[in-house]
Image: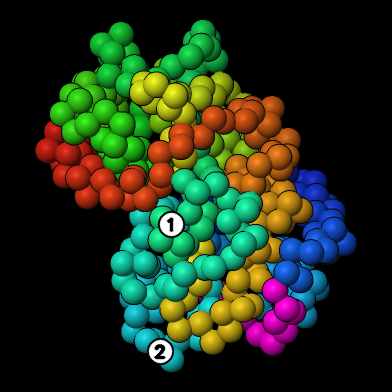
């Protein structure tokens, strides 16, 4: 399952290259201790990524400039686990990078990872965004927010509220079985229990303004088209749409909505987030280099550049958001439910979504 789309990435804001280059220069100049914490590994490193190479390339270049380690990047669109499994002990992969906690847990359960053992990662990334067993770490976050009609009065809202009959015929979302939604439902099961989550799903289905289909940006499109007032969607698409060419449909959609930050109803709960992340490969030929790259990726300048390139949220505290995300959404209070809990409930979530025939 991949995230950012080919069609939108090149349309990012015109200053993107300059910003990336500035970030690159920053990353090159201002990363003293991070990558040096482990002895300079030198040599080569092979990165398997399901993320588009363009999204990570500026960071990899900065890492190479810093450490002298060449990074061979292999874009694995589908079947990352199957490929690494099939390669076995001969796999050239040192680091495995993907999106969605479920995919990372699949790598661990598939036996193709090894413990990270990185003091830098443990210091930079909160525990709820790392594998409980130390087998993977998040590198960036995306929030599951609500796009809403600009005429709606903004105020505190909970995911659970979307099942309220007052929203009848006014809610849009993509397929319930898309991993973005199964993760949200899994988190709700962890917070509210299965019975209440089933009731919620039934209420949400009854409130849909159209069949759950299409992508997250279509939620913005359909809000502008008057088909719905509110809908579930990921945060980074807001940056993608708002940086699209002036006059384009995507730009109109991005500029035509407001973004609400729902939380779960449970006391102290926050906004549902999912991640991009990485794990050191079990048979990594150069695990020291893999750990050095991870330490670099969670360093402050790398986090800033990564977040700006992808319109995502940094996992490291105190790192500035992309200006578009800052103004359109601002900081989110990320739910601190361990991501491993979400992964644990995803099968249950998927069965529940089928049980209520959500997509029918
Ligand atoms: Fe996506």
Q: Secondary structure at mark 2?
A: helix
Q: Residues within 10 Å of mark 2 (few under 14, many from 20)?
A: some
Q: Secondary structure at mark 1?
A: loop
Q: Earlier in the sequence, mark 2 or mark 1?
A: 2
Residue at disc 2, CB closer than 8 Å to ligand 1: no
How far across and how far down the image is residue 251, in percent? 62, 34
Task: State which quarter of the image contains the C terminus.
Answer: top left
**On the picture, is 249 further left or further right than 197?**
right
Q: How many marks?
A: 2
How far across and how far down the image is residue 247, in percent? 66, 33
Using the rendered image of the protein, determine whether residue 217 is visible from the camera's viewpoint: no
Disc marking residue 172: none
Q: Which corner quadrant of the image does residue 58 belong to?
A: bottom right
The image shows residue 294, relative to residue 298, as above or below, that is: below
Q: Residue at x 47, y 30 (%)?
A: 271
Q: Residues within 10 Å of mark 1 (few under 14, many from 20)?
A: many
In front: label 2 or label 1: 1
How far across and how far down the image is residue 128, in percent? 47, 46
Q: Which corner quadrant of the image does residue 31 belong to?
A: bottom right
Q: Residue at x 54, y 68 (%)?
A: 117
Q: Residue furthest left?
A: 355
Q: Residue at x 77, y 76 (%)?
A: 67
How far across and how far down the image is residue 125, in percent? 58, 51
Between residue 208 and residue 72, name the one nearer to us: 72
Reading the image, the residue beneath label 2 is 89
Reading the image, the residue beneath label 1 is 131
Between residue 92 and residue 290, name the one nearer to us: 290
Magenta residue span:
38-49
Q: Residue at x 20, y 39 (%)?
A: 353
């Amino acid at each position: 399952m991949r995230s950012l789309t080919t069609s939108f990435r090149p349309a990012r804001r015109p200053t993107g290259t300059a910003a990336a280059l500035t970030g690159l220069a920053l990353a090159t100049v201002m990363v003293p201790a991070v990558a040096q914490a482990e002895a300079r590994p030198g040599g080569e490193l092979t990165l398997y990524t399901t993320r588009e190479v363009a999204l990570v390339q500026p960071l990899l270049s900065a890492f190479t400039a810093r450490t002298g380690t060449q990074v061979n990047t292999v874009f694995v669109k589908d079947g990352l686990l199957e490929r690494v499994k099939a390669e076995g002990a001969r796999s050239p992969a040192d680091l495995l990078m993907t999106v969605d906690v479920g995919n990372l847990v699949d790598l661990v359960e598939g036996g193709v990872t090894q413990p990270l053992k990185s003091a830098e990662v443990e210091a930079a990334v909160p525990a709820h965004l790392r594998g409980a067993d130390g087998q993977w770490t998040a590198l960036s976050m995306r929030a599951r927010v609500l796009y809403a009609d600009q005429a709606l009065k903004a105020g505190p809202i909970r995911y659970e509220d979307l099942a309220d009959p007052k929203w009848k015929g006014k809610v849009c979302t993509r397929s319930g079985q898309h991993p973005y939604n199964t993760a949200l439902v899994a988190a709700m099961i962890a917070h509210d229990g299965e019975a209440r989550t089933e009731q919620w799903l039934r209420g949400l289905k009854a409130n849909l303004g159209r069949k759950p289909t299409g992508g997250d940006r279509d939620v913005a499109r359909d809000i502008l088209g008057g088909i719905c007032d509110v809908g579930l969607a990921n945060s980074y698409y807001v940056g993608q749409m708002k940086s699209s060419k002036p006059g384009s449909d995507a730009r109109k959609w991005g500029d035509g909505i407001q973004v609400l930050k729902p939380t779960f109803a449970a006391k102290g709960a926050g906004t549902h987030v999912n991640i991009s992340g990485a794990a050191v490969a079990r048979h990594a030929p150069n695990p020291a280099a893999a750990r050095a790259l991870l330490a670099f990726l969670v360093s402050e300048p790398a986090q800033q550049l990564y977040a700006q390139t992808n319109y995502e949220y940094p996992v490291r505290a105190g790192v500035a958001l992309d200006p578009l995300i800052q103004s359109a959404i601002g900081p989110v209070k990320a739910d601190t439910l361990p991501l491993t809990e979400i992964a644990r409930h995803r099968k249950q979530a998927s069965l529940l979504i089928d049980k209520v025939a959500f997509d029918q």
